[in-house]
Amino acid sequence: MEHVAVVPPMIPGAKYVGDEMCATCHEKVAHDFKRTSHGMRVLKEKGETKGCESCHGPGSLHAEADGAKGKILKGNWEMCYSCHQRVRSEFALQYHHPIPEGRIGCNDCHTIHGPVKAGIRTVSKETCYKCHQQIRGPWTFEHEPVEQEDCDVCHNAHGSINNRLLIERDYNLCLKCHYSTAQFQAVGHYAHRRALNPSSVPGGGRYSTCLGCHRGVHGSNFSKELRSQ
């Protein structure tokens, strides 16, 4: 994950108090955070702005007001963008998860503070299934990448120039694995009798795609060729 150097957020009239002060109330969060990739990075920074306050801003007013929420910065996606500039650009693409629209937040998928075993970067298909239950299965006929891999083998969860957040246009993506009839036959799949170009199959046209026939790409209860019906 790429990061850029940024100026920590400011809160008018507030001063930095250090992680030890934060831990007096947020003991478990502070303990877990130190062992996450976020924590290990920001705690190594030099100067008074490291640690919790590198994201939440200086905490003196918050501490003096017995933890008043209005005296500290609450985490949001703009805060994450201050370091994750590349991710910000992905959310600006035509197809993206609705972070900019405010319908979800980074912490709906990423565990920012911990626990350690969850981590920040550990986003699996179980994370995606929280919202996308319709593709979970089980299916009578499974698609191996869905069963054995995580969703990012086909999708960029932040944003893409391709519909459905695909990392490539659907036929180019499919041909990464399904590039020859021999490969199909070797693993026991149905093989096209013609070239694996959607426009060359019976009934296909210039703008045909794999999904035109194989609509059950995540899995199917009807067809081993992953047709939806």
Image: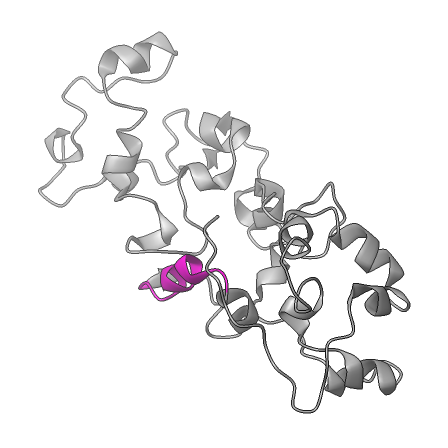
The vertical placement of 8 against 41, above or below, is below
Query: Looking at the image, which residue sits at the far left?
Result: 206
Q: Residue 65 at what x, y percent from top left? A: 86, 87
Q: How many marks?
A: 0
Residue shown at 71%/65% (left/top)? Answer: 52
Residue shown at 75%/51% (left/top)? Answer: 34
| Rendering colour mode | one colour
The vertical placement of 89 against 215, above or below, is below
Residue shown at 40%/63% (left/top)? Answer: 91
Residue shown at 43%/36% (left/top)? Answer: 153
- Foreground of the two, 181 or 18: 18
The vertical placement of 28 against 214, above or below, is below
**Is 187 left, or right, of 81 in this rendering?**
left
**Is 14 left, or right, of 169 in this rendering?**
right
Q: Residue 112 at what x, y percent from top left? A: 66, 57
Residue 190 seen in render: yes
Residue 140 seen in render: no
The residue segment tinted magenta is: 83-94
State which quarter of the image contains the C terminus.
Answer: top left
- Tell me where residue 212 sits by quadrant: top left
Query: Looking at the image, which residue sits at the far bottom?
Result: 13
Q: Residue 89 at what x, y percent from top left? A: 36, 63
- Tell me where residue 70 sits by quadrant: bottom right
- Foreground of the two, 179 or 83: 83
Q: Residue 127 at what x, y percent from top left? A: 61, 48
- In reply to whether residue 213 is colored magenta, the answer given is no
- In reply to whether residue 89 is colored magenta, the answer given is yes
- Tell me where residue 92 sits by quadrant: bottom left
**Is 183 left, or right, of 120 in this rendering?**
left
